[in-house]
Image: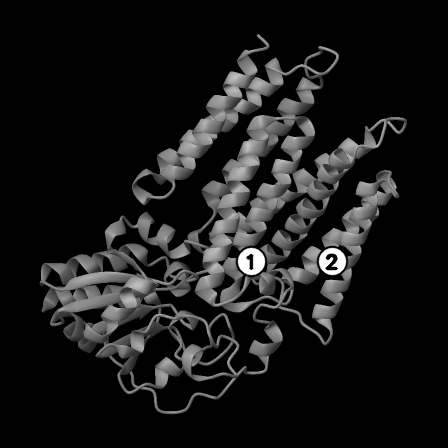
Amino acid sequence: MDSILPILYLIASITFIIGIKMLGSPATARKGNLVAAFGMGLAIFGTIFLYKTSSGEHLGNLPLIFGGLIVGTVVGWIMAKRVKMTAMPQMVSFFNGMGGACAALISLIEEAHRDPSATHDPVHSLTIIAGLVIGSVSFSGSIIAFGKLAEKIKDLSFSGQQFLNILVLGGVAVLSVMFVLGSLSGLTFLLVLCALALAYGVLFVMPIGGADMPVVISLLNSFTGVAAACGGFLYDNMVMLIGGILVGSAGTILTIIMCKSMNRSLANVLFGGLMSAKAAATGGGKTATGSIREVSATDGAVLMAYAKQVVIVPGYGLAVAQAQHICHQLEHELEAKGVIVKYAVHPVAGRMPGHMNVLLAEADVSYDKLVEMEEINPEFATTDVVLVVGANDVVNPAAKTDPDSPIYGMPILDVEASRQVIVMKRSMKAGYAGIENELFYRPNTSMLFGDAKASLTALVNEVKAL
């Protein structure tokens, strides 16, 4: 029986790897999720029934363990079933924060049960402190991100904020080193350190807003993975270690990719130097000037129906209107008339990494039609019509033309290079970054105001009638 548990852990680890691989394609993502979930269930129940302590005893408190499993499963199931696509980013942040909290609690519990007469082990202490600090930062940062994405918490910035962030982080680092070296110890000390780490998580995320939020979510996700891996070290649990490493490494790689997409360095992210709410609130650049041209659904349908190529740029507004299915229908109607239709997906469109990919996959849009920014940008010059549905900051030319803009330097979709741009918006309200969009005032841009779902429905009907 002692040899069965390592085999189960091996099987579970393999399912994690296979599941992550399958998540790379919308066609296999659901199966990949189930495969990884099966492996996790196998590891959990194998641990409950087969794991033995150093004294040779099985785990106790089974009613409490199964009670927690049942409550967590029911709550998680209900939240996942009820969540709307627009609220998916904040739910991801919330669940990620719970993972960080668990990792921090593991460290606190391990320290509470450590024998004070035992010889000091720097490696063991390092693992405890890493799980505590990283998990605490992930928890508090994710909860703040949840509140900001749900628009319950506003961006906050003040003079000297970066200095305070560095001061708190430096204090956490110094105290952590002292704990590892054995100069300080005890549960009370760890609780103080936990409070400081929680404070840094709040200070780290509070000033961040705008299009930078997907980068933060990805970074916090990698933090949780690393914290979980620390728990694997503490318990000498290989499946927990491998799972944490997979999440941490995947989150880190994605963070680096997202930082490049935002033209930001990872160090800039870590020290809270991302686009601040203050920069956006103060206008962050030149005021856009010019006249706005409106277009009717009829005229817009004519432009697209007689075009050779139409590129659709999805944004958060598409998710808000739950208009992905009608957008897919418009794609079919245009293709029936011989129009080439593609989707231009910016790496940070929406509120979390891959938000638009998930949204369009839900509507059965072919993954082959989703074109990344680097590939689609050269095509805009030969594109007849670009339809921007609810996107804002990722198509704002100010990122290239206005050095004072808070998004300056961020790579964007070069939609302004196309022959005609139709922007669908409810109003002229600024995007998530809080700044005006120069694109709206360009001579080749027309505005189609209204709810995205209603406007897309009107376009579909007009295209059918032609």
Establish if 185 lies above or below 336.
above
Label located before the other in sequence (2 or 1): 2
- Dot 2: element: helix
**Amino acid type indicated by mark 2:** Leu
Looking at the picture, how far across and down is residue 358, in whole percent? 37, 50
State the quadrant of the C terminus. bottom left
Whether residue 85 sits left or right of residue 205 in the image: it is: left
**Amino acid type indicated by mark 1:** Val
| Of residues 151 and 55, the one drawn nearer to the viewer in this rendering | 55
Residue at point 80%, 34% (across, down): 111
| Of residues 344 and 266, the one drawn nearer to the viewer in this rendering | 266
Residue that numbered label 2 is attached to: 169
Crowd around label 2: few <14 · some 14–19 · many ≥20 (10 Å): some
Crowd around label 1: few <14 · some 14–19 · many ≥20 (10 Å): many
Determine if residue 453 is in view.
no
Residue at point 25%, 80% (across, down): 295
Looking at the picture, how far across and down is residue 324, in whole percent? 31, 56
Whether residue 201 sits left or right of residue 110 in the image: it is: left
Residue at point 46%, 81% (across, down): 436
Residue at point 46%, 63% (across, down): 260
| Of residues 98 and 224, the one drawn nearer to the viewer in this rendering | 224
Point out the residue furthest to the right here.
117
Looking at the picture, how far across and down is residue 243, in whole percent? 54, 34
Whether residue 137 sits left or right of residue 4 in the image: it is: right
Looking at the picture, how far across and down is residue 425, in whole percent? 37, 73
Residue that numbered label 1 is attached to: 216
State the scheme by which the image is colored. one colour
